[in-house]
């Protein structure tokens, strides 16, 4: 009987009956479970798409100086975090629905836990920092937002995010171990489990609640505040612009300064949606005294869906950037499609012309005029 079923890191694929009844139930072989075939296929698609997409973003950043902007530094950090979970965790957990017992040993168990927590922490904190950067870019005076030290501050923040994430991910790696589970009198398996019995039930509840607050609720609360501030400032700026400046060039510049804020919002919403089911299940399972008794097929497939979505998130960011960012879309087409390179040259010429017109515009010197998009 799989009495520890339900944990996000408890990589055993039990049925609802296995955990909802305190008496021994019939064991369902892997080959008779639909998730045995569906989940590995999904993970294979995630691995290929995530690897190609995120490696491409890293390459764009290294290869093209135009891409190396301050906000794109945060995008780079997101891609590196996604590559970590794709290469350091996904290959190992992708077999848990086809290989019954954890086959990799305790070191890989600890490593996969560390990589997962590290990637999630980097993702959510970086999204928060990116939202804060956009809030400053839109709301703060121009002379404060611009400056030679801004890139250095951004790099320092990005490095600080990784250091903090390593510290937050360390306990999961330290306490993870191989748990022996008796399926029947003649059958036992090993699973990667992060909550040692000697720490008691309080530790598992503390970790679940801590991850929900630190990796989900609190960051999303700050992000919401940032976007409320941005929305208010954009509304006021739009009214001021309508009164003081009718230039179509300036209007385009107003639109461009909010473009990355919208891109960041799409990334944030995607993260929130992908991690919501997993947090709901973890809170329900560990804080509901009757969770093991009421665990059924609904919660079983909800758990699997939440588990899979946390990995799907790692391949969605490049797709979102392709859809919402014209700059990244041009480079994706250039390197991943058989397209003409004239798109790149045309965009560079258009940008130069826009900058030239902005310098000649009198409206660009008004205090109430919008700041340049960075």
Image: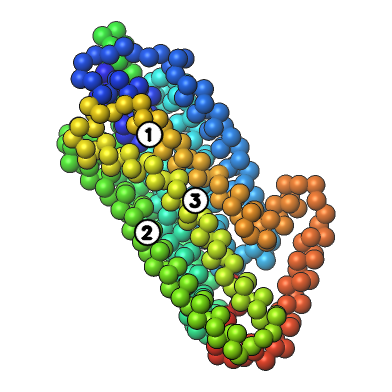
> Mark 2: which secondary structure?
helix
Q: Which residue is mark 3?
A: 270
In the figure, 315 relative to 76: above or below? above
Side of 179 relative to 272 (left or right): left
Task: Bin the neighbour count of mark 3 within 10 Å (Cα to Cα): few under 14, some 14-19, many 20 and up.
Answer: some
What residue is at 56 percent from the left and 60 percent from the top? 263
Residue 191 image point, x, y percent: 34, 26
Q: Nearer the viewer, residue 168 or 28?
A: 28
Side of 283 relative to 262 (left or right): left
Q: State which tag comes first along the sequence, 3 or 1.
A: 3
The quarter of the displayed image where residue 223 is located: bottom left
- Disc 3 and disc 2 in contact, CB within 8 angstroms: no
Q: CA distance from mark 3 to mark 1?
A: 18 Å
What residue is at 62 percent from the left and 46 percent from the top? 53
Label drawn at residue 303: 1
Q: Which residue is mark 2?
A: 219
In the figure, 157 relative to 312: above or below? below
Q: CA distance from mark 2 to mark 1?
A: 23 Å
> Mark 3: which secondary structure?
helix
Q: CA distance from mark 3 to mark 2?
A: 14 Å
Task: Bin the neighbour count of mark 1 within 10 Å (Cα to Cα): few under 14, some 14-19, many 20 and up.
Answer: many
Q: State which tag comes first along the sequence, 2 or 1.
A: 2
Q: Nearer the viewer, residue 183 or 301?
A: 301
> Mark 1: which secondary structure?
helix
In the figure, 345 relative to 13: above or below? below
Q: State which tag comes first along the sequence, 3 or 2.
A: 2
Side of 293 relative to 85 (left or right): left
Residue 290 image point, x, y percent: 20, 32
Side of 116 relative to 82 (left or right): left
Label drawn at residue 373: none
Task: Let me know if residue 1 appears in the view.
Answer: yes
């Amino acid at each position: 009987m799989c009495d520890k079923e339900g944990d996000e890191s408890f990589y055993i694929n039990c049925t609802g009956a296995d955990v909802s009844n305190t008496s021994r139930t019939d064991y369902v072989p892997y080959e008779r479970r639909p998730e045995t075939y569906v989940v590995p296929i999904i993970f294979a698609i995630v691995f290929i798409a995530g690897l190609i997409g995120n490696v491409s973003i890293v390459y764009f950043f290294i290869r093209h100086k135009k891409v190396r902007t301050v906000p794109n530094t945060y995008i780079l950090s997101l891609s590196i975090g996604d590559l970590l979970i794709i290469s350091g965790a996904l290959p190992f957990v992708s077999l848990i629905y086809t290989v019954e017992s954890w086959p990799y040993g305790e070191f890989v168990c600890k490593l996969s836990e560390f990589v997962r927590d590290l990637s999630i922490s980097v993702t959510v904190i970086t999204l928060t920092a990116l939202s804060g950067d956009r809030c400053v870019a839109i709301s703060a005076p121009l002379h404060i937002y611009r400056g030679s030290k801004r890139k250095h501050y951004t790099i320092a923040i990005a490095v600080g995010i990784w250091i903090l994430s390593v510290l937050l991910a360390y306990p999961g790696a330290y306490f993870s171990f191989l748990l022996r589970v008796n399926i029947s009198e003649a059958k036992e398996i090993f699973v990667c489990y992060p909550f040692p019995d000697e720490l008691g039930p309080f530790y598992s509840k503390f970790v679940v609640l801590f991850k929900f607050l630190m990796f989900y609720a609190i960051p999303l609360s700050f992000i919401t505040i940032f976007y409320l501030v941005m929305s208010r400032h954009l509304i006021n700026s739009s009214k001021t612009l309508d009164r003081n400046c009718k230039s179509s060039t300036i209007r385009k510049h107003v639109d461009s300064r909010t473009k990355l804020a919208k891109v960041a919002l799409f990334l944030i919403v995607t993260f929130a949606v992908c991690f919501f089911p997993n947090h709901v299940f973890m809170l329900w399972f560990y804080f509901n005294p009757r969770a093991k008794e009421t665990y059924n097929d609904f919660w079983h497939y909800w758990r699997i869906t939440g588990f899979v979505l946390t990995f799907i998130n790692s391949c969605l960011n490049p797709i979102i950037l392709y859809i919402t960012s014209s700059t990244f879309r041009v480079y994706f087409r250039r390197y991943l499609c058989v397209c003409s390179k004239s798109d790149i040259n045309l965009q560079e010429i258009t940008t130069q012309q826009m900058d030239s017109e902005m310098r000649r515009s009198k409206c660009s010197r008004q205090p109430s005029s919008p700041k340049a998009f960075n």
